[in-house]
Image (cartoon, rainbow, N blue to C red):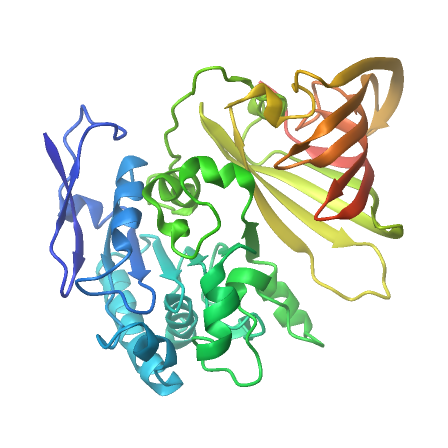
Amino acid sequence: MDRLIPWQAKTLPLILVACAGLAGCSQVAPDRDVRMTRGYVYYLDGAGGGGMINWSGGVREGLAAAGYEGAGEVFKWNTGLGVVADQTASESYKRDKARELAARIRDYQSAHPGVPVTVMGLSAGTAIAAFTLEALPADTRVANVVMLSGSLSSTYDLTRALRAVDGKMYVFTSQKDGVLAFLVPMSGTADRAGGTTGTIGIEGARTPAGASAETRRQYAKVVEVPWTERFSSYGHHGGHTDSVNARFVEAVVAPLVVTATKPFAATANETAGSIPNPDYTRWAGFPVGSYVVYDGYQEIDGVRELLRMKATLMAKDACRLTVERTFEVLDAAKSQPPLNRYFYVSATIKPEAHPMTHPKASLVDLPAKTMEVGGRALECHGLEVRAQATFPEWGTNVAANVYSHAEIPGGMVSVGLRTHMQGKSVAFAGRVVEMRGAGK
C-alpha cells in the first residue's frame, strides 16, 4: 500500500512514498490536517532546483522513513533560470523571497500557535534560510534550523538570524565537497559577499571577530556536524548533494526535526557481523539530558591548551543515540565561544570500527583507582587500549588509558588519549568534574 506524505509546493505535486521499510507502516498515516498541528518543515532547495529539477525527494523520503509526524513544503525561491542564475542572483532578490517565506511562516504560526517549525536549506538555500530568519517578526520564531552543504559565507554574521531560533542551528560541513571547494570560488557565495569564498558548508559558521556578548550568546546555538566516514554507510560520501540522500536524512537529519508530540528518532537496520558498540552501551542506560563535564587539556602537534568538554545525551532509541559535545578553551587570553559538535552513535558496529573491539587491539586491565566525583568516592576500573589501525571517530594508531564507572554518564571517569588525525599528532586528557543523570 502506498503512503501519501502531505508535503506541498507551488509547482510540485504531492509525493507517494512506498510503505515498505517505513516506520509505523502498519498504521494509517494521519491526514494533512492532523499533520499540520504537529510540525512543519520549510525546505529551501539549492541553486538550479526548486522546480521540475530539485533535490527535495531525498528529504521527503528520509523524513517519511523516519516516521515524521508533521507536514511541510518546498518553498520555491529559485529564479528558474538554472544553477548559475540562482547562485548569482542579487542579494535584494533573495531577500525579497525571504520576506515572502517569513510571511508564510508567520501565517502558519498564527493558524497553528505553538507548533514547531523547522527551516532546512541546501546549498544556496542556506542564504535564503538566514535571510528569512532575519525577516521574521519578533513574535515569530522557529524551533531548529538545518543548513546542508551551505554556500552561505562562513563569515556571514548570523547574530540577527539566530535571535529567531529557539533551539539550534545545525551546520553540516564536508571538506570533500567539490562544488563548494572549486565552483563557488568562481561564482561567489550565495549571499553575494565580496572578498570571501569561504562557505559554511566547508568552514562552518565563524563567529565574527570582536564578537559582542550578545553575538557569542547567539552563536552558542550553532552546532557544527562535520562529515565522517561513518556517514558513508548512509550514502553521504562527502559530496555536495549527498547531504540530502534519503538514507542520510533518515538516519542523521531527521532526528533534528522537532514535532509537537516529541522529537522523533530514525530507524536503522542491524547488519550482519555487527557487535554492540561500547560507546552506545555506556550511554544507553541514562535518560536524555544526562551530561558529564571533563576538565583537562588538548594537545595538537605539541601545542597544548586547557580545555573543558561537556558531553550531553540529546536523544536515544534502540538503534542509535545522539551526543552533543561542547568544547571550551580555558584560557582567558583566548576569547572564543564554545564549539558545539554532534556525534551519532549506532547501537551496533563492525568490530574493526572501534579501538576497544578491533580484532587486533591490545586491551590490558589497569589497577583499580578510587576517584572522587561530586563528593563521592568511586572505585573505578582501568583499561589500557592500544589499536594500530584507523578509526572514523578516533583517528589512527590509538593509545588510551581509561578509568570507568557504571554510574557516570558515558561511563568514563577519566581518559587519556593519543592518536593521529589529519596528519597531526593529537592528545586529550580529562577527568570528570561535574555530572547529572542516573542510570536505569
Q: Which percent across, then down, holds residue 183? A: 46, 70
- Residue nearest the viewer, comparing 14 with 111: 14
Q: Is residue 163 visible in the rendered structure shown here?
A: no
Above or below for 259 versus 415 = below
Q: Along the horizontal axis of the image, is 344 left or right of 63?
A: right
Above or below for 428 versus 127 = above
Identify which residue is drawn at 48% across, 61% down.
178
When asked about the image quadrant of residue 373, the answer is top right
Above or below for 139 versus 147 = below
- Residue nearest the viewer, comparing 105 with 247: 247
Identify which residue is drawn at 9% across, 29% down.
1
Q: Along the horizontal axis of the image, is 195 left or right of 366?
A: left
- Residue nearest the viewer, comparing 260 with 315: 315
Q: Which percent across, then down, holds residue 47? A: 33, 69
Q: Which percent across, then down, holds residue 297? A: 84, 45
Identify which residue is drawn at 60% across, 48% down.
341
The C terminus lies in which quarter of the figure? top right
Above or below for 153 versus 24 = below
- Residue nearest the viewer, comparing 308 with 107: 308
Q: Which percent across, then down, holds residue 123? A: 40, 64
